[in-house]
């Protein structure tokens, strides 16, 4: 069976099960010609079926949902080899049955509960600076690699330094070209992360990110801020242009490259 036909068949079976659980299928485009991708989302969790042509692998994976979409920290749940030169309907059925079981069995229920518990913890104001940085990946995809480089080279994650060097410079360009709806949604990221963030995260939002903006860009965002963030941002604006003591890097580490079959 041709791999595209097998992929569509397996995705269809997974969709039948996930729709029962309240998931919706999203229109997505693969990042490159080597992949076929499908995506299903709920309010807290996302599932994806991917076929990697070069590896001849059919993969089921999951990740946590954020207000901006999947956080893209995918965890592989099942992997099957599928060679279209020898693959049959029976092989596609076996893969489909395994994937359906993975999204509907006891482990799937446990997975959903763990995600809800994690989200509740973040809602209590424990979201850290690295969590904040990852929320901007939706707007600035290049941040994904920059965050990885930061994690590879420094411990702990230098939240303020990373925000200053990698996030702040990107903000003006987006703000200047955003329409009203895009601006409201973008400001919503600041509102949510300020509300959910720990002390360091809140300081990074106000002192580092918002104070990096000129008055025009700042005011464009300010109009869409929550009442709490408006107060904090106004108070922080008094520090704009003043020298803030840099954070101390406690430890530097280097990671050796490792092979991964993900």
Image (cartoon, rainbow, N blue to C red):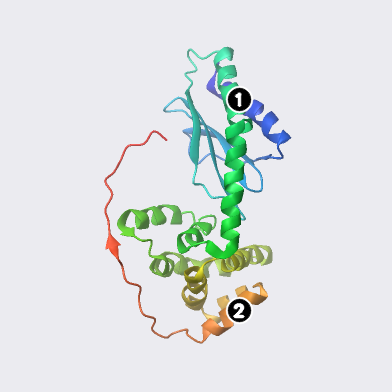
Which of the labelled discs sits on residue 144, or is there none?
none
Residue 8 x/y as whole percent = 61, 26
Residue 20 located left or right of residue 206 = right
| Relative to 260, residue 198 above or below | below
| Residue 144 located left or right of residue 225 | left
Q: Earlier in the sequence, mark 2 or mark 1?
A: 1
Give the quadrant of residue 27: top right
Count of numbered marks: 2
Q: Position of residue 241 (x, y in %)?
A: 44, 85
Residue at horizontal 66%, vertical 72%? Answer: 226
Kindly indicate the quadrant of the structure image that contains residue 90: top right
Numbered disc 2: secondary structure: helix
- Nearest the eye: 151 or 172: 151
Q: Is residue 79 depicted above or below 171 in this figure?
A: above
Q: Is residue 49 above or below residue 210?
A: above
Local SS, label 1: helix
**Which quadrant is the C terminus positioned in?**
top left
Query: Which residue corresponds to the image point at 66% horizontal and 44% vertical from the top-left?
Result: 42
Left or right of 31? Residue 89 is right
Q: CA distance from mark 2 to mark 1?
A: 49 Å
Which quadrant: the N terminus? top right
Q: Which residue is mark 1?
A: 10
Percent x, y of residue 152: 33, 53
Give the percent coordinates (x, y) of residue 174: 55, 65
Say which mark, if any, is on residue 219.
Answer: 2
């Amino acid at each position: 069976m041709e791999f595209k036909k097998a992929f569509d068949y397996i995705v269809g079976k997974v969709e039948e099960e996930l729709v029962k659980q309240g998931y919706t299928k999203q229109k997505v485009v693969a990042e490159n010609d080597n992949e076929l991708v499908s995506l299903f989302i709920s309010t807290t969790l996302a599932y994806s079926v991917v076929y990697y042509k070069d590896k001849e692998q059919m993969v089921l994976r999951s990740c946590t949902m954020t207000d901006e979409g999947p956080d893209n920290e995918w965890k592989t749940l099942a992997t099957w080899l599928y060679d279209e030169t020898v693959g049959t309907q029976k092989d596609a059925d076996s893969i489909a049955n395994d994937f359906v079981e993975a999204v509907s069995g006891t482990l799937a229920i446990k997975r959903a509960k763990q995600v809800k518990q994690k989200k509740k913890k973040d809602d209590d104001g424990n979201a850290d600076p690295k969590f904040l940085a990852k929320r901007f990946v939706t707007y600035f995809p290049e941040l994904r690699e920059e965050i990885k480089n930061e994690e590879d080279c420094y411990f702990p994650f230098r939240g303020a330094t990373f925000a200053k060097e990698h996030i702040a410079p990107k903000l003006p360009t987006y703000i200047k070209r955003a329409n009203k709806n895009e601006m409201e949604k973008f400001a919503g990221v600041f509102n949510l992360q300020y509300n959910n963030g720990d002390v360091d995260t809140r300081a990074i939002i106000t002192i580092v990110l918002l104070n990096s903006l000129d008055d025009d860009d700042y005011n464009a965002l300010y109009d869409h801020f929550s009442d709490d963030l408006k107060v904090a941002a106004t108070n922080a604006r008094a520090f704009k242009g003043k020298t803030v003591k840099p954070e101390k890097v406690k430890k530097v580490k280097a990671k050796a490259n490792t092979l991964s079959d993900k």
